[in-house]
Image (cartoon, rainbow, N blue to C red):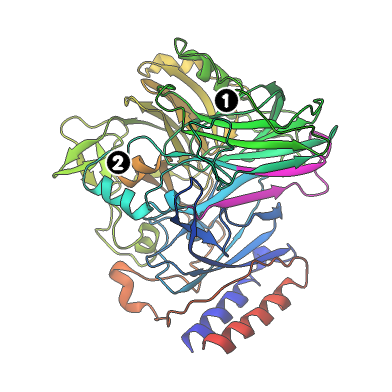
Amino acid sequence: MSLMLFFLATFLLLFHPGSAGDPFAFFDWDVGYKTVSPLGVKQQVIAVNGEFPGPIVNVSTNWNVVVNVLNDLDEPLLLTWNGIQHRKNCWQDGVLGTTCPIPSGWNWTYQFQVKDQIGSFFYFPSTGFQRAAGGFGGIIVNNRDVIAVPFDKPDGDITLFIGDWYIKNHTDLRKMLDNGKDLGMPDGVLINGKGPYRYNNSLVPAGIDYETINVQPGKTYRFRIHNVGISTSLNFRIQNHNMKLVETEGSYTVQQNYTNLDIHVGQSYSFLVTMDQNASSDYYIVASARFVNETIWKRVTGVAILHYSNSKGKASGPLPDPPQDFYDKTFSMNQARSVRWNLSAGAARPNPQGSFRYASINVTQAYLLRSGPPVVINGKRRATLNGISYVPPETPLRLADQYSLKGVYTLDFPERPLKGAPKLGRSIINGTYRGFMEIIFQNNDTNIQSYHMDGYAFFVVGMDYGEWTENSRGTYNKGDGVARSTVQVYPGAWTAVLVSLDNVGIWNVRSENLDSWYMGQEVYVRVVNPESTNKTELPIPDNALKCGQLEKFQNLQTPHHKTASSSITTGSSGPLVLFMLLLVYITNFS
């Protein structure tokens, strides 16, 4: 009976007045384990509906997305939607600060609207180091038909997931971190869940399954590239082909050609690539590790194949060269600075992207978030921001606010790094609603880091080597800094972003480097409208899970396991179709 009420409540939620008239897309996902051998050794990965990587969510601006998730793992699960802003709805964010994990064998249904954004994003499991085992997939948010796209429609759309990979299971990697060990060099780089093409017999063993992208000569394709790895920045390139950058994480960019581009952990880019070569043979698609000793890391290279329909033979010979910048640490940073906002392109709304004049807005809050090498706190190896290593409470922060629970967290996160010994904490940032926040990420570690903010796109306005000072603001890009959700911070350097706090909720700011995140390098920003109104944040969903101090109020489900199928239904008939699906669930599981 409780499950019946749960599904009926989900159905009724679809008729929320704010969603009326917008299409719905429904997905039914079974997240479970699968045995594969991407690097020639059998291992357990996390698959969605048996797919590794998972299915792509392909929707358009303003659509409502409903994802029914069955947790078929043997441990709790949360899915987060990297770059999707969840306007007024942090309940669907899928991180421990806002949502209780889905217990093993339980269903939970996400519902959110992809509002006022376009472009390339991805989802992944956010807890327990699970992303190291997979569970990720793509999200494509298309423009509405009435909004012009700033380039001709491509002849095809191709999504590639690149990322470093370990043969060890995510549970073993987790234990290594818990025991104070470093993960060491990855075993390889995967492209779409597959190992490298055998371009070198001594580096790549026989029998590895590799990715092949089939294309037609003369056609132009949109490549959406996501670095879904653990901690390795990758250089992406396609042999003999120019890549015209057109979009990153929901923003159209100034269009310019690259022969290669560094893509850091958690980042997403779109390129237009024209098949203008003579197809004397296939071509290499390469993702290789950056900022490492390339002699030692040679085997940590992902290689896929670009195959023209009229190709005359297999790819052979050496891979296209990576950037030759061993003695020039500014190359990658200058490349990053060249990624700029296309001020004339329309975004999700008819007005141009550049109509938001961020440089004319007064900053109301400024936080310098400093990171460094891992430290030992209370005998455990931890990562910090401003000297604080975040420890998630048993009760999610937003749930604690909803039920007026005291003592779950504190609102005293320091604006500047703490002096003295690092410490564990549950201190979060008290953001000012409709304020304009400056965040400076200062990386005093020897490794490159990526940082992400849920619920928002921020303007990347500056980066440089050395320590940030007040005078550094004089170097900011005040015109066309790109708006995105994930930014890299080079070792011994800083990166500054500006963000308009117009989205009520509690939002995660984290290292996208999975080991740093797991060890506590994150903080939450709490944005509350001081006025008493229900118009700036959606209410707690009827199916919200309860845990921690509220666990006694949770209605139990009977755990069950099944094989789900991915489905999508759109248009005005969506609610009727969902109601029919709910009746099926009620019949099967009540």
Q: Can you say whether 235 is above or below 175 in the image?
A: above
Image spot of residue 338 (x, y percent):
61, 20
- Magenta includes 141? yes
Q: Nearer the viewer, residue 315 or 287?
A: 315
Which mark is drawn over residue 359? 1
Q: Secondary structure at mark 1?
A: helix
Image spot of residue 17 (x, y percent):
66, 68
Image spot of residue 168 (x, y percent):
37, 49
* Quadrant assignment, res 10: bottom right
Q: Secondary structure at mark 2?
A: loop
The answer to whether residue 186 is left or right of residue 29 is left
| Mark 1 vs mark 2: in front | 2
Q: Which amino acid, by three-letter code, is at mark 2? A: Phe
Q: Can you say whether 471 is above or below 74 in the image?
A: above
Which mark is drawn over residue 570? none
Q: Name the residue rendered at 58%, 47% in the picture.
A: 209
Q: Nearer the viewer, residue 215 or 328?
A: 215
Q: Which amino acid, by three-letter code, is at mark 1? A: Ala
For disc 2, the marked residue is 413
> Of the residues under marks 1 and 2, which one precedes in the sequence?
1
Outermost residue, left side: 379
Q: CA distance from mark 1 to mark 2?
A: 26 Å
Q: Can you say whether 111 is above or below 508 in the image?
A: below
Crowding at dot 1, Cα within 10 Å, few <14 / some 14-19 / many 20+, comes out as some
Q: Can you see residue 252?
A: no
Q: Name the residue rendered at 30%, 44% in the picture.
A: 520
Q: What span is colored magenta in the figure? A: 134-160
1 and 2 marks in contact (CB < 8 Å): no
Crowding at dot 2, Cα within 10 Å, few <14 / some 14-19 / many 20+, comes out as many
Q: Name the residue rendered at 34%, 55% in the picture.
A: 171
The answer to whether residue 121 is left or right of residue 512 is right
The answer to whether residue 311 is left or right of residue 463 is right
